[in-house]
Amino acid sequence: MKTSVPIWRLLLGLLPALLLGACASYDAQTVHGKSLVGITRFFVVSNLNDNHALDHRLAEALQARGFEVQIGPLTMMPENTQAIVTYQDRWTWDFGEHLVYLTINARDALSNEAIAAVTYSVSIPKREPLPQTVAGLVDRLLSDKKS
């Protein structure tokens, strides 16, 4: 006896996966009374656990927006740095590595006080190129500079 599944049942079963596949959470925050407006010199602190060159990708995204950026360990930070950028990332494996979490923090180089942060989180990895994801997050981090 041959049984078949109606096509509508298959589509109904795939619908949640299709809807969840595009779900990404972005959370951008600026500390009250703080702003990245007027800051032109950033220092991206290299993360020793980073196997994806995110420090360089962050620097490239900032440089593409006209900022002066240096990269390295905190001990190599130039004296004229205005903001320090740090990040934390998490990846998953699904026939390739995919970014599932990235938080980027910017803090004042002199006072070490937080200025702004942005967090990216997905439950199902997106298939967009990493430079595109990083560029979007940098735009969100700098969003108060555009007003």
Image (tube, rainbow, N blue to C red):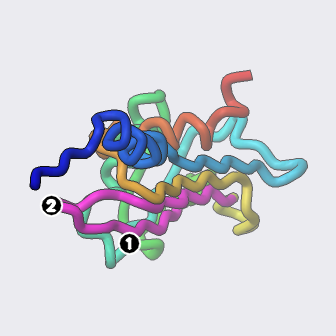
Q: Which amino acid does label 2 sit on?
A: Phe
Q: Which residue is drawn at 48% across and 55% down?
A: 122
Give the class, few, some or many, for how many residues have Cα within 10 Å of label 2's Cα (few <14, many ≥20). few
Q: Gap between marks 1 and 2, in whole Å?
A: 25 Å
Q: Could you tell whether 117 is left or right of 78 in the image?
A: right
Where is residue 116 shown, x and y percent of the image? 69, 52
143 shown above or below 48: above
Residue wearing tag 2: 95
Q: Which residue is drawn at 54% across and 44% down?
A: 41
Marking on residue 47 = 1
Where is residue 90 shown, x and y percent of the image? 40, 69
Q: Which of 81 and 112 is in front in this view?
A: 112
Magenta stretch, overall SS? strand
Q: Could you tell whether 147 is left or right of 11 in the image?
A: right
Q: Nearer the viewer, residue 90 or 77?
A: 90
Give the class, few, some or many, for how many residues have Cα within 10 Å of label 1's Cα (few <14, many ≥20). some
Secondary structure type for disc 2: loop
Membership of 29 in magenta stretch: no
Q: Residue at x 62, y 37 (%)?
A: 142
Looking at the image, do the residues carrying marks 1 and 2 touch, with CB atoms under 8 Å apart?
A: no
Image: magenta residue range: 86-107
Q: Which amino acid does label 1 sit on?
A: Asn
